[in-house]
């Protein structure tokens, strides 16, 4: 098990006490205090505002920005192929055979070419006016200029009008003017070759060929009319990896091919997936989809807008879910099954669906610079209208498949309703299919040994945990806020509580006298809550539940508390995580001793952490810190009295405790 010092910045060491600074008066606040950041300096000063951080995922976002520009040319019908080349020395290039970035003098900045303006000025691009692009992914206008700002070196070549042009940059600044290299035949388009800056991402940051290849392949799936030519130096590919050194990625079947690859080997409820495509003149409102329903596996939804991944969903996903649910209910009504289907919800239908949806719209609105969620209201209407009509025809044309799907959705709805009345759920035997409770995302490991259940608060934290987990050994169960306080609740309230019923069913071992160690489904049960007061309260309620209802689970050494960080501290390329204020001060003294301002990011909750951050700090068994909950033999009577006093139904006992310990609490907060 990793220690706290391993995770939060290395072994502690005592720093020499700093000399007290000479006392001066308050700093003067004047006009000179107002700092103006020019050009691309804001990007280098605060890269997290533009690409979400300085970790590996953020560095690969640079590639996404450049690739998106090339894809926009392909989607607009001006490019037929894109070339991606990864070189040994860390250089990465993306080229296309599109129109090429304009190279003439810019009408407003006549001393600069249009290319230089695009590369060095934020919010400069050809995608704000829909005349240049009917649909595009780069509508924020900061993409390639941000890549330039965060690159040690960047080179741009443009072939247009039979001439070849070239300009070089370093950390966002031009190394010279645009140079005309002469005539060139049989070539057109743009080539961007760049190397990420180690000052931003750290000297140990390297491109991951597998990640780049997957990103390139997904783009080829999303637009069947493009060919992506992949090249990678074989020396960079790990032994045993299935990533090719060279490949031509072209998938005329689009999302249908993509879905088939993702669910290969998995059993589906229907014989054929529901796929479709609507292409409209100019591209605005065009969409493509593919969805299958998995019999025994976790579902997923991969959505895109203008080929940009939207992992947090948005209006296009909402329209898709609504269309499928309404059409299935209409089908039930047509065949006289409306009464059975009346309780079916979108979650019942989509909970185990493997779905992909790609929409192309003009001037989409995204949430955040990373475009993780689509906010365009019109997208919901466009998707719902097109998909509902198509799904109606699909259901009517294949009645046997439609009935299978209807029975599947009804079964899930009935199970959801049945769980509300369950009081004590015995673990299913190995010969019976396990029905997953609530929003549990299970692991693939069938053995108790080595498997872990993370209990998290809320869907937001649950989403991050699902992405960060090891699917083989780690399961995630999100809970809605604070659970019932079982120390003061009646038995009827306990048995009627849905969250506790879901938790009991997930564990499979029963409650109280019916607890069965041999039926426990996970070797570790890990409470993972926010590193704040509310998180501590939720953790205490959960511990009380286990102490009162499953004491043998604690006695067996199965209950743990995760230790997520409260702060992320960044100085240059170095990042460390602090558990609390005291630990933050210690790290600022001992670990962040270099030059430059220390950026402090306080996590408001687990949901604010990226999946990579959550994995690194809290879920990876090789790096995390866990606190084991134990019952000390000689203190059991004292523990029972404490739980009854603080969590029981006698408020006067809690009030007395507050009075007795008020001085201690005041000392802790340094009143």
Image: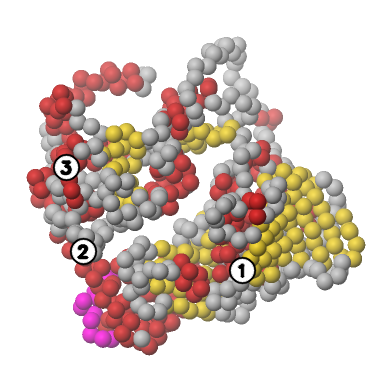
What x and y, as percent, mark residue 167? 82, 53
Membership of 339 in magenta stretch: yes
Figure disc tally: 3
Q: Residues within 10 Å of mark 3 (few under 14, many from 20)?
A: many
Task: Locate the N terminus and report the quarter of the image it occupies.
Answer: top left
- Callout 1: SS: strand
Q: Is residue 194 above or below residue 332?
A: above
Label 3 vs 1, first from the N-terminus: 1
Kindly identify the residue that appears in the image at 61 percent across and 39 percent down: 204
- Callout 3: SS: loop
Task: Find the residue positioned furthest to the front.
Answer: 240
Q: Choose top left, top right, bottom left or bottom right for residue 318.
A: bottom left
Describe residue 191's horizontal placement relative to residue 530 as left or right. right
Q: Is the residue under label 1 in contact with that under label 3 (CB below 8 Å)?
A: no
Of the numbered discs in the image, which one, if any, rests on residue 550?
Answer: 3
Describe residue 407's horizontal placement relative to residue 53 as left or right. left
Comparing 87 with 354, the one in front is 87
Membership of 16 in magenta stretch: no
Please report the bounds of the magenta region as a residue range.
334-345
Of the numbered discs in the image, which one, if any, rests on residue 200?
Answer: none
What x and y, as percent, mark residue 11? 47, 25
Q: Which one is in front in this view, the residue at disc 3 or the one at disc 1? A: 1
Whole-angstrom CA distance, mark 3 to mark 1, is: 54 Å
Comparing 368 with 291, the one in front is 291
Kindly identify the residue that appears in the image at 58 percent across and 80 percent down: 280
Q: Which residue is mark 1?
A: 249
Describe residue 541's horizontal placement relative to residue 95 as left or right. left
Q: Which residue is mark 2?
A: 431
- Callout 2: SS: loop
């Amino acid at each position: 098990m990793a220690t706290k010092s391993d995770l939060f910045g290395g072994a502690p060491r005592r720093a020499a006490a700093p000399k007290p600074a000479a006392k001066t008066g308050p700093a003067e606040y004047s006009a000179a205090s107002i700092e103006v950041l020019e050009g691309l300096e804001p990007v280098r000063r605060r890269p997290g505002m533009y690409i979400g951080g300085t970790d590996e995922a953020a560095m690969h976002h640079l590639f996404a920005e450049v690739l998106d520009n090339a894809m926009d040319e392909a989607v607009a019908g001006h490019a037929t192929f894109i070339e991606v080349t990864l070189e040994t020395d860390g250089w990465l290039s993306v080229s296309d055979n599109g129109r090429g970035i304009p190279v003439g003098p810019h009408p407003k900045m006549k001393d600069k070419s249009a290319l230089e303006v695009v590369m060095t000025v934020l919010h400069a691009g050809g995608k704000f006016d829909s005349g240049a692009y009917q649909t595009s992914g780069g509508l924020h206008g900061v993409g390639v200029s941000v890549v330039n700002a965060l690159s040690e070196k960047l080179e741009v070549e443009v072939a247009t009008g039979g001439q070849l042009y070239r300009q070089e940059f370093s950390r966002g600044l031009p190394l010279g003017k645009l140079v005309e290299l002469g005539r060139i035949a049989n070539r057109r388009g743009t080539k961007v070759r760049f190397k990420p800056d180690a000052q931003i991402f750290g000297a140990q940051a390297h491109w991951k060929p597998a990640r780049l290849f997957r990103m390139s392949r997904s783009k080829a799936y999303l637009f069947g009319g493009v060919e992506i030519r992949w090249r990678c130096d074989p020396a960079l590919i790990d032994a045993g990896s299935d990533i090719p050194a060279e490949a031509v990625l072209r998938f005329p079947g689009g999302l249908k091919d993509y879905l088939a690859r993702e669910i290969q080997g998995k059993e589906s409820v229907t014989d054929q997936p529901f796929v479709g495509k609507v292409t409209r003149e100019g591209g605005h409102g065009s969409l493509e989809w593919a969805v299958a329903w998995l019999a025994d596996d976790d579902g997923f939804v991969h959505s895109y807008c203008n080929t940009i991944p939207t992992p947090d969903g948005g209006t296009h996903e909402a329209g898709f879910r609504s269309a499928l649910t309404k059409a299935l209910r209409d089908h039930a009504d047509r065949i006289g099954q409306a009464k059975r289907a009346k309780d079916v919800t979108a979650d019942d239908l989509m909970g185990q669906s493997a779905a992909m949806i790609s929409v192309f719209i003009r001037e989409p609105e995204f949430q955040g610079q990373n475009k993780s969620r689509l906010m365009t209201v019109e997208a919901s209407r466009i998707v719902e209208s097109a998909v509902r009509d198509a799904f109606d025809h699909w259901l009517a044309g294949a009645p046997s498949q439609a009935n299978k799907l209807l029975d599947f959705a009804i079964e899930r709805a009935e199970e959801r309703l049945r769980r509300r009345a369950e009081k004590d759920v015995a673990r299913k035997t190995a010969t019976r299919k396990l029905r997953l409770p609530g929003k549990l995302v299970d692991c693939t490991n069938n053995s108790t040994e080595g498997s872990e259940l993370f209990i998290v608060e809320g869907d937001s934290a649950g989403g991050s945990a699902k992405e960060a987990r090891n699917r083989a050994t780690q399961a995630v169960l999100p809970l809605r806020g604070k659970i019932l306080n079982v120390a003061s609740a009646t038995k009827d309230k306990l048995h009627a509580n849905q969250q506790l019923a879901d938790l009991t069913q997930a564990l499979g071992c029963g409650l109280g006298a019916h607890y069965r160690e041999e039926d426990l489904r996970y070797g570790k049960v890990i409470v993972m809550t926010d590193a704040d007061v509310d998180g501590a309260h939720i953790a205490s309620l959960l511990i009380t539940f286990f102490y009162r209802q499953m004491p043998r689970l604690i006695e067996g050494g199965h209950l743990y508390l995760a230790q997520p960080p409260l702060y992320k501290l960044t100085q240059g390329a170095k990042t460390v995580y602090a558990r609390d204020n005291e630990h933050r001060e210690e790290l600022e003294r001992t670990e962040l001793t270099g030059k430059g301002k220390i950026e402090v990011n306080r996590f408001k909750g687990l949901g604010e952490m990226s999946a990579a951050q959550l994995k690194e700090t809290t879920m990876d068994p090789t790096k995390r810190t866990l606190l084991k909950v134990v019952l000390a033999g000689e203190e059991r009577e004292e523990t029972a009295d404490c739980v009854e006093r603080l969590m029981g139904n006698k408020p006067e006992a809690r009030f007395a405790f507050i009075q007795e310990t008020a001085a201690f609490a005041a000392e802790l907060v340094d009143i």
